[in-house]
Amino acid sequence: MVKNKSDKNRKSSHGLYNKSGQIQLTFSWIYILIAGAIILLFFVGLVFKQQAAAEESLAFDVVQIMDSIFTGAQVSEKTKNFIDVSGLADYTLSFTCEDGLSEFGIKGQSSPIQNVVDPIFSPQEIKTTLLILWSLPYKLPFKVIDMMYVTSINTKYFILGDGNGFAEEFYNSTQDFNRVLISNPTDIDPEKNFQVRIIDLEGVYVKPNQLVPAKLSLLEDDKVTAISFTASNMVNYFKKEDNLWKQTNLNPVQIISLSGERNAAKYAAIFAANDEVYQCNMNKAFLRLKYLIEIYEEKAKEIETHYNLNPELQLNKDCLNYIQKGGYEQNINGALESLKNIVAGCLFKPSLCGDLLQPAEDLKQANIDLGEKGDCLTLY
Amino acid sequence: MLRKKNGQARMNETIAIVFIFFVLILFGIMFFYQYQKIAIKEKNEELLGNRAMDTTLKTLFLPELICTKGEAEPEDNCFDLMKLRHAEKTFTAHLNDYYYELFSFAKITVQEIYPGNKTYILYDKEKPPLEDGSSGWTRKEPTYFVVTLKDENNTEEKSNYGFGYINIEVYS
């Protein structure tokens, strides 16, 4: 009887242990599962964080390297640089300029490079394997700044019309660029290019609300733009909207430059994404002009003092008349003063910038006269 | 009693495993932190070096300084002393509103070696000191470049060329 009871007790206690063991085992597994899941989540989170950080870091590195390349390309004026960016073929580079501040970087990523000094003319977006950089000096009449043009091998430029020989000049000076001379808008074929820009040098092929060439209808609206040159260095910018040309600027944009080959401001207008980007970057050049005038004014004073202190130097010369305001009609001091006054207004009201041309021409002539007719020291 | 001891041993074992696990994680974090610290330091040094090169390049081609002769190509690595003498005034007057954007925290000096030995400090902007009064910068990277110095302000009215060097120090 006693044995029976003890057997029963052992059985029941064995069952209890069994149940307790089962619960403990189940609990352990749940615990392991939760702990494992948390650890896994932690590492998954870490991986995502690292991925985001790596992308940010890549974007930062890319823009830093691009900034250095741009600096090098900008100072090596008249040299074309072809940069292999096939590693960035999946990324879109974006360029903007608003209120005098340019930004460039990888689209959708933070940390773009900001620049308030250097004028950079480019399409708004570039997605390519080969970047093309080119710079030309902007002179008014002395060198003001190097203008930087950024484009790509898959941005195609269609040149329409002759533009008094400018078509040939542009075509010849942009060797290895993706450009073509055409005589009829129907010849335009975007092929597999990322974007196209039509350059209407006669101002007759691209008009507001006119149909865009048929083959361009397949491209996205923001990938089709046009620039149309009208009389006396005026341009209008267009973009495609529902297969029609839409003019983006209200008033024609004036190209402020002195005549001559490789007109930096005219080339800038061609490479600029639109009128806003063009004027924003031109404003940077005018701001630099303002500070340069201050230095040239001081240099003019030094040259004037030099001749006043050494009258024997101009016994058979006429140097001071080319410098002083009371001298010849085109003189250094008068032209510099006019330039200074106009540039101050031009920075606030862009429509006044056209007035820079006359004093710039006068200064150019006075400087030539100073050197050639006067055999004197020149300003620049 | 035996089971109790067994349970205690297992508990100690679990605690030891958890402890070792966290120690390993802590080691990992410390290693990662140290690695990142060194990587950031190296990156900063690289950026400073790049900035020094960029600033040198920009300075050598400054329209405010370069030697020009009408429509002809500018002379490479040449500074016009008649402009250089007055550039400092313009750079200082517009330091914060314009030239800082070009040179950032840096010091640009032109040292004449021949014929004179004049020093021209064109631009000087240090990082502002910290709240405790200590210097705002920790490192500076100097870059030197030989330049010719053209001076036309002489009685012979010849382009007299001297030479010197440009010293560009950028602060980190």
Image (tube, helix red, strand yellow):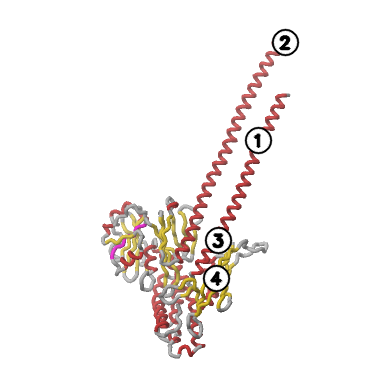
The amino acid on which the numbered mark 3 sits, given as a three-letter code, is Gly
Q: Earlier in the sequence, mark 3 or mark 1?
A: 1
Residue A85, position as x, y percentages in the image: 43, 54
Q: Which residues are magenta?
A: A155-161
Residue B140, position as x, y percentages in the image: 60, 63
User: Viewer-nearest of labels 1 and 4?
Assistant: 4
**Chain under numbered label 2:** A
**Chain under numbered label 1:** B
Residue B93, position as x, y percentages in the image: 55, 73
- Spatial CA distance of label 3 from label 1 is 48 Å
Could you tell whether A272 is left or right of B124 in the image? left
Say if labels 2 and 3 share a chain. no
Residue tagged 3 = B49
- Spatial CA distance of label 4 from label 2 is 109 Å
Residue tagged 2 = A2
Q: Does any portion of residue B64 appear in the rendered image?
A: no
Viewer-side residue, B6 vs B43? B43
Q: Residues within 10 Å of mark 3 (few under 14, many from 20)?
A: some
Viewer-side residue, A205 vs A184? A184
Could you tell whether A157 is left or right of A307 in the image? left
- Spatial CA distance of label 2 from label 3 is 94 Å
Which residue appears at 39% of the width and 65% of the height? A268
The amino acid on which the numbered mark 1 sits, given as a three-letter code, is Ile
- Spatial CA distance of label 1 from label 2 is 46 Å
The amino acid on which the numbered mark 2 sits, given as a three-letter code, is Val
Residue B103, position as x, y percentages in the image: 53, 66
Q: Residue B17: which numbered mark, if any?
A: 1
Which residue appears at 46% of the width and 82% of the height? A377
**Chain under numbered label 4:** B
The amino acid on which the numbered mark 4 sits, given as a three-letter code, is Ile
Name the main secondary structure of what is drawn in magenta: strand
Residue tagged 4 = B166
